Amino acid sequence: MRVPLAIEESYSYWQNCQPDICDRINNKTDTKTEKINQLAEIAFEKRWFGSKSMARTQLLLKEFSQRYEAYPVALTVLQQWQPRDLVTRRNLCHWHLQLVDPLYRAFTDHYLGQRRILTADITDAMIDLDIVGRWVSQNMGRDHWSPATIARMATGLIAAAASAGLCSDKMGKRHLLYPKVSDRAVEYWLYFLRALTFEGTLLDNPYWRSVGLTESLLEIRLQRLPHIDFRRMGELIDFGWQCADLNDWVLRLDLESLES
């Protein structure tokens, strides 16, 4: 994992990579590589990512093309919305990384979940570089990767998990945590998943499980969301979508912001 969560870089990307810039580059280029290189020249010149080198800028843009640009509706919404709340940005970056990175998704869902379950006191659940390195070698195939590569991948997974609020950020042994999750982030992700084919269901999936939103805890959160009328009657579930889609949802946010 060469680009972990990149919360601030993602925010800058949403702010600066506006549709007019992308359209202008798309009209001039034929390949994805050419597009990223031209966009990197603009980003580097305009210092989208501060003092990052050209090589790092290209790497970030290549990664963001998978995390965000591959989902045009979501990218348009993020460009328009540009959420200022840090908790919301952290949640969105975590879930978008889970979506495109199967190893990170398995690590933050199944593996960290098992670590919590196997610990008598959940507050004592911990990970460290050796523990995660063993898990990486088991999942990626010890024979195919050098110890240095496995250590680098384990370090990247831990760094991303710490940025997402899933573990403490101190060096060495890290306590497992559950992060704060904003209502805005939950609504965004629900409307995003609604139009997507993904692993799990709208009530049970790796994204909710990774942040501790399961069963009744999730349903309590859903019942207080302003743009969804969630109801359960026995086995019957009704989400009561108030917005047609993700685009309609962000337009509703804009309208409410103007009225407030």
Image: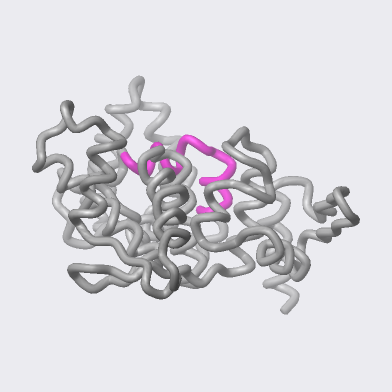
Which residue appears farthest toward the right when viewing the image? 233
- What is the magenta segment's predominant secondary structure? helix
22 relative position to 82: left or right:
left
Name the quadrant of the C terminus: bottom right
Identify the residue shown where x is 41% and y is 30%: 26
Q: Position of residue 118 (x, y in %)?
A: 43, 59
Res. 254 in view: no
Identify the residue shown where x is 39% and y is 40%: 101
- Relative to the observer, which residue lies in front, 257 or 6? 6
Looking at the rendering, which quadrant does residue 233 occupy? bottom right
Region rendered in magenta? 63-79
193 relative position to 65: left or right:
right
71 relative position to 44: left or right:
right
Res. 192 in view: yes
- Relative to the observer, which residue lies in front, 224 or 232? 232
Looking at the rendering, which quadrant does residue 7 occupy? bottom left
Asked if the magenta segment contains residue 171, the reply would be no
Number of numbered markers = 0
Which residue appears farthest toward the bottom when viewing the image? 260
Identify the residue shown where x is 23% and y is 73%: 170
Asked if the magenta segment contains residue 73, the reply would be yes
Name the quadrant of the N terminus: top left
